[in-house]
Amino acid sequence: MRGDRNGILRLVRAMPAPCKRQWHKALPAPPVTGRVTPPASRLRGRRLAPLGSMATHTPHVLVTGAAGFIGSHLTERLLADGFAVTGLDNFDPFYAASEKWANLAVVRRHPRFVLHEVDCSDADALEARVARVPIDAIVHLAARAGVRPSLEDPTGYIRANVLGTQAVLDLARKRDITRIVFGSSSSVYGDSSDVPFREAMDVGAPISPYAATKRAGELLCATHAHLYGASIAALRFFTVYGPRQRPDLAIRRFATRMLDGSEIELFGDGTTSRDYTWIDDIIDGIVAALAWTQRTPGACETFNLGGRRTTTLARLVTLLESALGVRARIVGRPRQPGDVSRTWADTTKAEQHFGYAPRVRIEEGIPRFAAWMRQRVQHRATAEFQAAGLALGTR
Ligand SMILES: NC(=O)c1ccc[n+]([C@@H]2O[C@H](COP(=O)([O-])OP(=O)(O)OC[C@H]3O[C@@H](n4cnc5c(N)ncnc54)[C@H](O)[C@@H]3O)[C@@H](O)[C@H]2O)c1
């Protein structure tokens, strides 16, 4: 059965492009054995069957950006669900490498996890590093993230996010890997006032280099799927937060400064708003999208993954104040170029295709995040105290 399907796939690849989509729609779904099997979607209330009972080899996922915020959480989930994971990361200096190694603390010694330090935009190095890895699917999250820094270094963002994405797609083509999830962003909607954002809306006017690179990545994915019949889910994440959140993002930045008594800079008049998405909801969405790529050979779609509600900056600060038990000392600043007025996800499409259903509301998520922040501060204080004690003892 597997051989037949691969034979048909080879034939389809040799066809002129317009015929391919038709054929891919007609292809039988890949067999469960020897492919990435969809972990039972918690979104639909099913549980994962033990892998050993249904697979002859451990399904293997390549996660790029594995040491980052979202990548490290995804790696943990995939390993817990029975997958083997090869992680790639170049430990980009956007924030401290020590934070990224700490992100991997839980998984580093896991027998089904390997990490390679490699730059995804270096196609040769990328191919060489994973030459012997039996990859079934790719989740491409490696990118230079962040809107404001992209205004300082657009070329660097294009190298990492556009060339990096193309190099990953080239790898997929050469290795015949047909299931890909791409981490895109709500920033592709630009400063649209038409809310909530739907995937069918015009996304031809991004307002930062970062947003433009993410839209470029989506287009490269669509082209790749069209030419080579891959199944690709491009997921537009809406501001993700939770433990290990990137230090540059507002929630983490504010909380850090509020806890050490510093002022926080508030850009704009506090009325700008964001759709904040709890990390576990995003991970559920990625895992469900990965399963969707198995059910829909040859399809390429964009999906919003958001919290489905929008929160103003002023309200966010109030929530942080009550969760941290600290009054914020606010300094007003003008709105920054590249910043959008609002984000708000309509997630109907992801819900219909793979049962996406965000669960954690901001009123629940912020106290959970605050608990993680406090624990982190405590750990650091203990570590510093111990280091000081050791230093005194060695005098
Ligand atoms: N966090 C959010 O709110 C959010 C929102 C929208 C989209 N996204 C997207 O989700 C993905 C993950 O974001 P995150 O918040 O975890 O960011 P992150 O910075 O924590 O993780 C990205 C990881 O990619 C690595 N990386 C960067 N360039 C690389 C390259 N050329 N080769 C290999 N590794 C490279 C970095 O070292 C980092 O560890 C990114 O693509 C980002 O654009 C995130």
Image (cartoon, grey):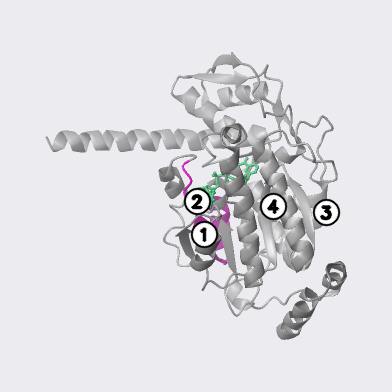
Q: Are marks 1 and 2 in contact (CB under 8 Å)?
A: yes
Crowd rating for badge 3 (residues with CA inside 10 Å; few <14, some 14–19, many 20+): few
Tell me the kind of residue under disc 4: Gly
Q: Residue at x 74, y 37 (%)?
A: 206
Q: Which quadrant is home to the C terminus?
A: top left
Magenta-drawn stretch contains 76: yes
Residue at which label 2 appears = 67
Tell me the kind of residue under disc 3: Gln
- Classify mark 2: helix, strand or loop: loop
Measured from the top left, where is residue 99 in percent x and y? 44, 43
Spatial separation of the CA atoms under disc 4 and disc 2: 19 Å
Q: Are marks 3 and 1 in contact (CB under 8 Å)?
A: no
Spatial separation of the CA atoms under disc 1 and disc 4: 19 Å
Q: Is residue 62 visible?
A: yes
Spatial separation of the CA atoms under disc 3 and disc 2: 31 Å
Q: Earlier in the sequence, mark 1 or mark 2?
A: 2
Give me the disc on residue 357: none
Tell me the kind of residue under disc 1: Gly
Residue at which label 4 appears = 285
Q: Are marks 4 and 3 in contact (CB under 8 Å)?
A: no
Spatial separation of the CA atoms under disc 4 and disc 3: 12 Å
Q: Residue at x 42, y 33 (%)?
A: 377
Residue at which label 3 appears = 352
Decide if ligand 1 comes within 8 Å of the CB at mark 2. Answer: yes
The magenta segment is 72-93
Q: Residue at x 62, y 77 (%)?
A: 55
